[in-house]
Every structure is written in structure tokens, then in C-alpha cells.
Amino acid sequence: MENFIVSARKYRPDNFRSVVGQGAITSTLKNAIKNNQLGHAYLFSGPRGIGKTTCARIFAKTINCKNLSSNTEACNECESCVSFNENRAYNIHELDAASNNSVDDIRSLTEQVRIPPQVGKYSVYIIDEVHMLSQQAFNAFLKTLEEPPAHAIFILATTEKHKIIPTILSRCQIYDFNRIRTDDTVEYLKYIAREEKISYEDDALHVIARKGEGAMRDALSIFDQVVSFSGNNITYASVIENLNILDIEYYFKMTTDFVSNNVSGVLLTFNEILEKGFDPRNFVGGLASHFRNLLVAKDPATAVLLDVGAGIAEQYLQQAAGVAVDFLYEALEICNDTDLQFRGSRNQRLTVELALVKLANLTQVQKKK
């Protein structure tokens, strides 16, 4: 039986060109290599799963490549590149600061730094989760980080830059990585789906991308999970079922009932949602997001802010045409007040039901005014 490799590892970028959503950073690093302006210490900072360690590895591989391409990419053919691709490079060292955070660990590292590389020009030390180092370890690391041997380059990666002492920060070039845009994540998921011969619905991939919250690794883990559940055909229905996400059709149906003052229909729909096991507070948050999407869909200039698939975006445009802006303003305010009241309420279901009744009577109140 062939060993399964998760998508986050199988499709991990191996050159700057394939890194998703970090164009400014990869361009800067490539220019530094091209112009031979390499620093001795770099700090890659940002949320989880967005490519910090990946970029560090690509950078380490590229600066040691003997036959760089015209667009400053590694050749994947020289001895340095081949040894890196086969995970046997002796001049690229990775250290997990979470489990190697003592003074003794740093002293061992500083002694190792003195040894010149056997293959390639530079020895690169990638220290992941560097904020986990102890105060004493940071202090022991300062001198080596400021004046390392000419062959040594340090790349520090962290998700919590604020925990790193200023004296370390002042010795590094700092690169702040961004969360990956939903559209960029969707395009990469489409690429993987095509490579794996998996059919998909655009709306389904948008749900996966939004669930990843800007972290590509999280999105790819969810993608693998959904594929295991639904097989080689990823549909919107299978994604929301597997991830236990409330179907957006409930929000569209409720909004129609709100506008037509159908209190009974709204309460029955809410009861159906609760019987399916969904949390009422999450429902209120989802309803507020629905009203927000309707509001931005009212104006063609802001419709681009809809962070959904093309099919669902069309539904928003259609429903927004039949909903007044004044209704949406007051509906958002009601949802916000309900969210604030929810935690302190003894009868949380009643709190939400009162808000739904207000929403269902909102158009009548506005007419009387």
C-alpha cells in the first residue's frame, strides 16, 4: 500500500515562484540574492501556516545554488540543490526552539556555527518558533547573531514577534508575512485538485479557504479531510456537512421571512437550526455576516468585498436588490446588541428569539415611522 502524503507536504513550494500570497517578500529576497546583498540575520514573522519556514528553506537552497536561473531561482540540478531536495544537506540546519530553548542548546549552536560548510558557500541556520527561547538563551545568542562568521546566515521564524527581546530584533532584517487572501488560497486548491484528478465546486473551495482563515497549511489540511469524506468530488453540500457549517441557505430564507414579517417562519427555522446542533451564538454571528454581505452587495463598488464563491455572490446580489438599506443598518445593530447580551443571559435561546422577532417586525416599524 502506497504511503499517503498530506497535501501540505506533497505540494509544499520548492522555489520562490510557487510561494502563494507573499510576492513582496519573495521579490525582496530574490533581489538580495541577485545583487549579492545578503544579511547575516533575518526574522520571518507572521501567523501560522503562511510560508515562513518554507521561504526560509527556499532562501537557504537558493543562496547555495551554483547555477541560478535568470529569474534567480535554484537550478535543482547542482550538488547543493540535489542534496537539499533529498533532505541530506549538511549546510542547512533547522532547530526547533520550542524544544531546544536552553543556554546549553544555544552554546552548542554557536560552536557549530564556526564550522564552514562542506558543500555550497553558506551555512544556514533556521530557528523555528524562536520566541520560545529563554531570556538567558537569547542573551547567549546575541554576540553570535551580531557578528557571525562570514559563511553563517541565521533565519529566525516566529508567530509571536512581540515576545522577542529588542536587542535580537535590532540585529535582524525583519519580514512580516501576511495572511493569504481567500482568492489566492482558492486558486492553489484548484491547482491541487486538478493535479489529484479531483472534481470540485467553486463555492466548496471558497468555504475551505475561508475556514483556513488565511493559513494555507490549515486550508490544505481541511482539503484533505474533505477529500477523505467525499471522495474525488468536492461539493458545497459535502463540505458544509463535513465541517459542520450552517448552510447559508438558512440565512437567505430567514432574510426573506424578515422582510415579509413572517415571525412564525423565522422561529421555526431557528428551531430547526438548534435541533441540528448548531450553537445559537455562532448563528447570530453568521446572521450578522449575512447582513453585512447584503449591505456591500447593494453597491456595485463594494460588491467586490463579497468573500464568497461566484454562485453564492449572485444570490447575494439578487436578495440585496429586494432589501432596503435602512433595514440592513438596524438589523446589524440588533445582531450586535444580541451578541453583547448573549453571554450574560440566563435564557440564551429566548435572547436570540427576541432578536429574531424584532427583525421580523423591523419593516413594519420602519413603515410606521
Image (tube, rainbow, N blue to C red):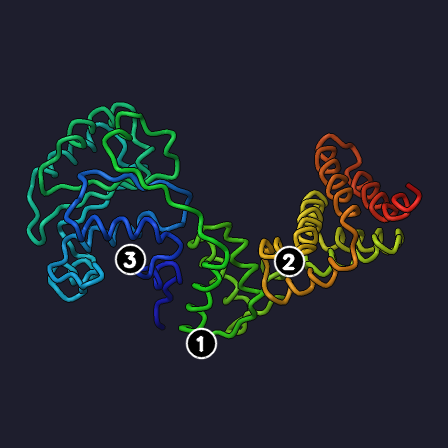
Circle 1: residue type: Lys
Circle 2: residue type: Pro
Cα gap from disc 2 to disc 3, whole angstroms: 36 Å
Q: Position of residue 294 (x, y in %)?
A: 70, 54
- Helix, strand or loop under label 2: loop
Drawn side of residue 273 relative to residue 258, left or right: left
Q: Residue at x 13, y 51 (%)?
A: 90
Q: Position of residue 24 (x, y in %)?
A: 34, 50
Q: Nearer the viewer, mark 3 or mark 1?
A: 3
Q: Are marks 3 and 1 in contact (CB under 8 Å)?
A: no
Q: Which residue is under mark 2? A: 300
Question: Which disc is residue 197 wearing?
Answer: 1
Drawn side of residue 42 relative to residue 289, left or right: left
293 or 107, nearer to the observer: 293
Question: Which disc is residue 169 wearing?
Answer: none
Q: Nearer the viewer, mark 2 or mark 1?
A: 2
